Image (cartoon, rainbow, N blue to C red):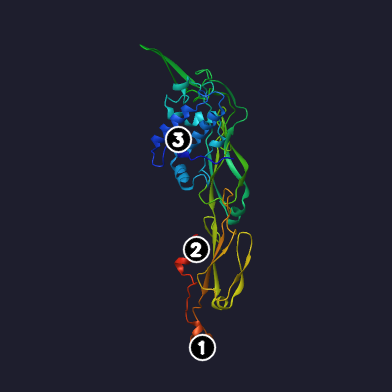
């Protein structure tokens, strides 16, 4: 699989471009690679779809901000363009070409943009929030979720719209001194679908849709993050009278773990040990996403030391790498002492070995943090 091209590069714009500039750039690219202008040209068709994908992300403020921050590495904020067919693209982005709501390419290709003129409506999207714990995020999980989506009701039949004769458009011919000019607009009777309801049972609204509870299986990949949005094409609301169903957009909510804190793909754990264990050394168990792990604390370990368990963090959502688990060692100092403990420590206080003597190999706070971030 080839790497995805940069969205800004596809449209020939830069990150400082305004929404209007992006719209004009998309219009230019879409006209250049439109299928009616490039019949049976698979490469042009792919570039046409690629431009639609770039425009959907860059024309949406939230998706654009997500892309500017993460690029292609962490999803695309809910974009579904890779699953769209030509009619979806024509329907979704037709308004940027003007022309009163007809096919986006009417003024350039004689109304051929939607393969015969009728505009297939797309159902609306559904949005849900899905809470995941750290274990589920680390390994990926399949969830059964319950959604209420609009579906076409049983017993509903449709017939051809008599206003537009099934084309979805109303065409007007105007005589001018330069000859006849043809303009097209979306049929208001069928909203461009070319069909209207013929028969519908009681309790069904004028759209012919009813709410239905469904259980959907969702596979969540390992490494997703809080705020990430996943998309399931065709699992949203159905469209009245035909057309593609909308998408199911799943917003990830990450539940905070009791012990482990997330930092990107790394996991951080605060380990507290006694002064005695720090001085003599010991073995301890620490929690991880794969179960408890036993680690060795060397004799003479200083407070603030960071231990790294390679590959014990979270897998990148694209599967390219796995983070580490970082263990921050804190030496616990007792707040109250018994008389016996105080006497022992008073005796040790006079020992030269208990006076601080950091050597050149002893890392300070800033050196440890620099090592941590690297």
- Residue 231, given in percent of the width and then of the height, sits at 55, 41
**How far across and how far down the image is residue 344, in percent?**
53, 87
Residue 300 on image: x %, y %: 55, 76
- Badge 1 marks a residue whose secondary structure is helix
Distance from the alpha carbon under mark 1 to that under mark 2? 37 Å
Label 2: which residue?
371
| Between 242 and 346, the one nearer to me in the picture | 346
Nearest to viewer (mark 1 / mark 2): 2
Q: Is 365 placed left or right of 158 in the picture?
A: left
- Residue 325 versus residue 170: which sits nearer the camera? 325
Quarter of the rendering occupied by the N terminus: top right
Residue under circle 3?
11
Q: Nearer the viewer, residue 314 or 127?
A: 314
**What residue is shown at x 39% (from left), y 35% (from top)?**
21
User: To which residue does mark 1 refer?
Assistant: 347
Q: Residue at x 62, y 53 (%)?
A: 139
């Amino acid at each position: 699989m080839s790497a995805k091209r940069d969205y800004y590069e596809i449209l020939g714009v830069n990150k400082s471009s305004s929404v209007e500039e992006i719209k004009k750039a998309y219009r230019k690219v879409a006209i250049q690679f439109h299928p009616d202008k490039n019949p049976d040209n698979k490469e042009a068709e792919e570039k046409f779809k690629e431009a639609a994908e770039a425009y959907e992300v860059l024309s949406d403020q939230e998706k654009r901000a997500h892309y500017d921050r993460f690029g292609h590495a962490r999803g695309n904020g809910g974009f579904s363009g890779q699953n769209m067919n030509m009619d979806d693209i024509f329907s979704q982005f037709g308004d940027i070409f003007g022309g009163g709501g007809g096919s986006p390419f009417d003024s350039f290709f004689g109304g051929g943009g939607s393969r015969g003129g009728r505009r297939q409506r797309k159902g609306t999207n559904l949005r849900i929030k899905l809470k995941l714990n750290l274990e589920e995020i680390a390994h990926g999980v399949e969830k059964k979720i319950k959604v209420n989506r609009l579906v076409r009701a049983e017993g509903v039949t449709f017939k051809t719209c008599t206003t537009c004769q099934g084309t979805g458009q109303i065409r007007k011919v105007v005589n001018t001194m330069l000859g006849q000019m043809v303009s097209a607009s979306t049929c208001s009777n069928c909203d461009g679908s070319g069909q209207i309801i013929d028969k519908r049972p009681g309790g069904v609204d004028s759209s012919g849709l009813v709410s239905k509870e469904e259980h959907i299986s969702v596979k969540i990949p390992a490494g997703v993050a809080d705020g990430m949005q996943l998309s399931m094409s065709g699992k949203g609301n159905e469209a009245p009278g035909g057309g593609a169903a909308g998408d199911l957009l799943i917003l990830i909510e990450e539940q905070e773990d009791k012990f482990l804190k997330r930092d990107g793909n790394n996991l951080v754990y605060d380990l507290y040990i006694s002064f005695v264990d720090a001085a003599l050394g010991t073995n301890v168990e620490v929690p991880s996403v794969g179960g408890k792990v036993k680690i060795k604390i060397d004799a003479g370990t200083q407070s603030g030391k960071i231990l790294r368990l390679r590959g014990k963090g979270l897998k990148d959502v694209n599967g390219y790498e796995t983070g580490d688990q970082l263990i921050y060692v804190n030496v616990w100092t007792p707040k109250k002492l018994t008389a016996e403990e105080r006497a022992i420590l008073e005796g040790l206080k006079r020992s030269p070995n208990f006076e601080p003597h950091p050597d050149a190999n002893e890392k300070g706070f800033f050196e440890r943090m620099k090592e941590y971030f690297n």
